[in-house]
């Protein structure tokens, strides 16, 4: 492998650093106490080494401070760091007497700078208004040292400490802002993922409902026609064999048509590449197929009379399918429930503006006709769902007394321009 290939496969330093930081943060989230113990232990050890080796005297304003006091101040300035993340405000207040004593006695231990670590955690975790009173607490020992043990000019002692305090606070605020921003992005991504899953489930549910409507319309209607033809053929077999033969031929034709439509629908489900973009694979009847539908119902033994007002305009395929399926379902229900001797009347009105009105009425004088209740079964629900897609209205219910029968009234309004 040449040098160029090695440069292309080498991991950038920034990615390596980010990955290591993610691992450290992940470990810290899982084991926060372990990190706190390590940091606190390091600070305590450094303070004790400074005390035991008398290194603190090299920068002290008063090298004659008793050793026991220096030990007490060293522990008081380092041990509270163990709780700096969970209770930073309390830790700062607990360290305040130690820092004041450190400044008053002139020991000026470097461990007093650990107040800045606590200040960083306050800026990172607590409300920003907390900084208004924590800043004076941090600066108070600096002012005490400048007054009691002056060393150089006032600005040389106070201004650097003030700038350090402000810098630590700004760093804490910046890290906090970035953390909140990252959390907001992660939350937004999580909500978008949930919303995407919900949209996918809704789309799947809508597709299942559409498929259920299509299968109900295809299978339910054709089976009802086949049942009517079979019953008629059975009665005609003993008296008119020719009529029985015609019924069997009609059953064969109807069943083949139903099988073809069902196979097309299943092909759409099986092959994602042939979804509705290929109209030849989706069973989408139009208004021109109504004559064939009504002829099949008549062959099944149901007299159907049709009345058409106006001329059909160029209706979109979806609206034509809705009209077709509503008429199909109405005739299917008549075959199922109206009983022998029933008749059906289909009235279709086309308005010049593109609105369509369909009224399907069946009548029967048979007392044993099967009762029908609005809202029961998949058929009426499917008709309502199809109608609602185009802002139409659909009414289905029994004829008023003393008539016996059923009426379905569909109204699709004019399609408004987009």
Image: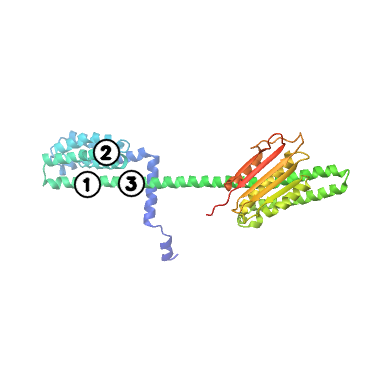
In x, y percent, where is residue 191? 46, 45
Please rate how many residues cluster around mark 2, counting C-alpha atoms within 10 Å: few if below 14, some from 14 to 19, many from 20. Answer: few
Find numbered disc 1 in the image and state the secondary structure of the residue it sits on: helix
- Which mark, residue 237? none
Note whether residue 51 is visible.
no
Mark 3 near mark 2, Cβ–Cβ under 8 Å? no
Q: Is residue 78 above or below residue 353?
A: above
- Label 1 to label 3: alpha-carbon separation: 20 Å
Instruction: Check disc 2 and report the residue beneath it.
Output: 130
Q: Residue at x 31, y 42 (%)?
A: 124
Q: Is residue 295 left or right of residue 121?
A: right
The answer to which of 372 and 227 lies nearer the viewer is: 372
Q: Residues within 10 Å of mark 1 (few under 14, many from 20)?
A: few
Number of labelled discs? 3
Return the residue at label 1. 164
**C-alpha distance separating marks 3 and 2:** 16 Å
Q: Nearer the viewer, residue 103 or 153?
A: 153
Looking at the image, tell me whether mark 1 or mark 3 is earlier in sequence order.
Answer: 1
User: Tag 2 or tag 3, which sits nearer the N-term?
Assistant: 2
- Is 98 in front, or is 359? 359
Q: Earlier in the sequence, mark 2 or mark 1?
A: 2
Kindly indicate the quadrant of the structure image that contains residue 213. Answer: top right
Give the quarter of the figure containing the N terminus: bottom left
Residue 177: mark: 3
Q: Going by the image, does 139 lie left or right of 343?
A: left
3D distance between C-alphas at marks 2 and 1: 18 Å
């Amino acid at each position: 492998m040449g040098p160029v290939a090695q440069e292309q496969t080498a991991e950038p330093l920034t990615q390596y650093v980010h990955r290591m930081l993610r691992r450290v943060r992940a470990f810290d989230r899982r084991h926060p106490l372990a990190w706190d113990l390590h940091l606190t232990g390091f600070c305590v050890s450094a303070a004790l080494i400074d005390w035991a080796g008398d290194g603190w005297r090299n920068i002290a304003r008063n090298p004659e401070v008793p050793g026991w006091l220096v030990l007490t101040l060293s522990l008081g300035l380092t041990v509270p760091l163990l709780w700096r993340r969970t209770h930073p405000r309390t830790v700062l207040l607990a360290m305040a007497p130690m820092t004041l004593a450190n400044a008053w006695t002139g020991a000026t231990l470097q461990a007093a700078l650990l107040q800045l670590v606590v200040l960083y955690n306050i800026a990172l975790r607590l409300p920003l208004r907390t900084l208004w009173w924590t800043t004076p607490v941090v600066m108070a020992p600096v002012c005490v040292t400048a007054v009691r043990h002056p060393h150089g000019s006032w600005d040389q002692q106070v201004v650097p400490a003030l700038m350090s305090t402000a810098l630590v606070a700004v760093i804490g605020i910046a890290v906090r802002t970035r953390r909140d921003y990252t959390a907001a992005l992660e939350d937004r991504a999580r909500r978008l993922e949930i919303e995407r899953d919900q949209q996918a489930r809704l789309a799947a549910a809508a597709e299942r409902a559409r498929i259920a409507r299509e299968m109900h319309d295809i299978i339910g209607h054709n089976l009802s026609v086949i049942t009517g033809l079979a019953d008629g053929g059975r009665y005609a077999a003993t008296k008119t064999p020719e009529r029985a033969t015609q019924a069997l031929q009609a059953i064969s034709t109807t069943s083949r048509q139903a099988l073809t439509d069902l196979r097309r629908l299943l092909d759409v489900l099986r092959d994602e590449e042939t979804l509705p973009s290929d109209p030849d694979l989706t069973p989408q009847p139009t208004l021109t197929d109504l004559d064939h539908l009504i002829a099949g119902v008549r062959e099944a033994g149901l007299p159907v009379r049709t009345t058409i007002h106006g001329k059909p305009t160029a209706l979109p395929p979806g609206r034509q399918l809705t009209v077709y399926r509503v008429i199909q379902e109405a005739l299917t229900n008549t075959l199922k429930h109206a009983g022998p001797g029933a008749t059906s009347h289909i009235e279709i009105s086309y308005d010049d503006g593109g609105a369509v009105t369909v009224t399907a009425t069946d009548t029967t004088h048979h007392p044993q006709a099967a009762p029908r209740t609005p809202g029961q079964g998949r058929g009426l629900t499917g008709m309502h769902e199809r109608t609602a897609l185009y802002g139409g209205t659909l009414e289905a219910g029994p004829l008023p007394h003393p008539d016996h029968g059923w009426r379905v009234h569909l109204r699709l309004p004019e399609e408004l321009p987009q």
